Amino acid sequence: MTKPLVLIVEDEAPLVTMLRYNLEREGFQVCEAADGEEALVQIAERRPDLVLLDWMLPLVSGIEVCRRIRRASETRSMPVVILTARGEEADRVRGLDSGADDYVVKPFSPSELVARLRAVMRRAQPDTGRDLLQFADVELDTAAHRVVRGGKAIHLGPTEFRLLRYLISRPGRVFTREQLLDAVWGQDVYVEARTVDVHIRRLRKALNADGGADVIRTVRSAGYALDHPTH
């Protein structure tokens, strides 16, 4: 089995050394870039399985690198984890809004980081269960990892895809943020409930980009459901 390739984008050499040591020990291949421009070159050439991206980078910021990954069709579903010293919630939300699947705040324990990377990569893998799931005019193909609405392809990041897959397989049912966290992020990884809101907002924006009716229902102080819109 091929070892998954992680691109470390970080300009602090001692941190890169520590990350490389711990990731290689856990069975990952590692490549590295010290700035945003080099990161974009490596992503295009090597197509890593996951990008571990520092927020503060020379030349091109980590947030901008993440946005470019999400804009390009070839890399749109590539898992991205942002590494940041910024602990404030607003900064973490901004990182998620840029398209990151998760974030890790410095300082962190190597074992926690590895668990978070494994969880993000697991979520990014297409499932081989039921192939086609449908609700209203939304179709989700788990085998091809594609979503279509009204005949038009919808581009989702890996976390939004998993979130939609979970909701579309149980239409009409209201899930709390905690239930969605357990189902989509996994019980072994700590993620704040606020993160669910960010990904729901991104999913909603993608599904409604062409003016379609909103099929995601927000149930105040309860959670979310995939439901037929009421007028």
Image (tube, helix red, strand yellow):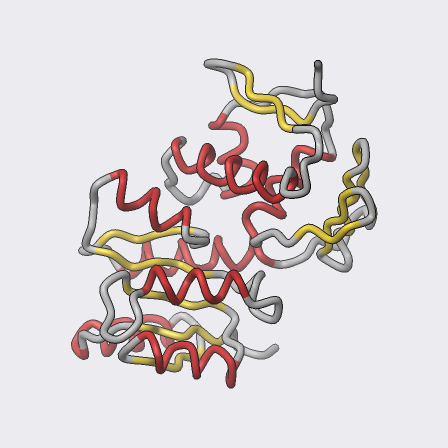
In which quadrant of the rendered image does the N terminus lie? bottom right
Is 133 in front, or is 179? 133
Residue visible at 57% across and 40% down?
Answer: 205
How many marks on residues? Answer: 0
Is 80 in front, or is 115? 80
Is 55 in front, or is 181? 55
On the image, the x and y values in percent for residue 157 come to 56, 53
Reply above or below: 38 against 186. Answer: below
Residue sticking out furthest to the front: 211
Question: Hey, which quadrant is residue 180 in on the image?
Answer: top right
On the image, the x and y values in percent for residue 78 come to 53, 64
Question: Hey, which quadrant is residue 217 in on the image?
Answer: top right
Residue visible at 18% across and 79% down?
Answer: 13
In which quadrant of the rendered image does the C terminus lie? top right
Reply above or below: 115 against 212. Answer: below
Residue visible at 62% across and 59% down?
Answer: 125
On the image, the x and y values in percent for residue 225 come to 63, 24
**Is 100 displayed left or right of 36 in the figure?**
right
**Is 42 displayed left or right of 121 in the figure?**
left
Residue visible at 23% across and 64% down?
Answer: 56
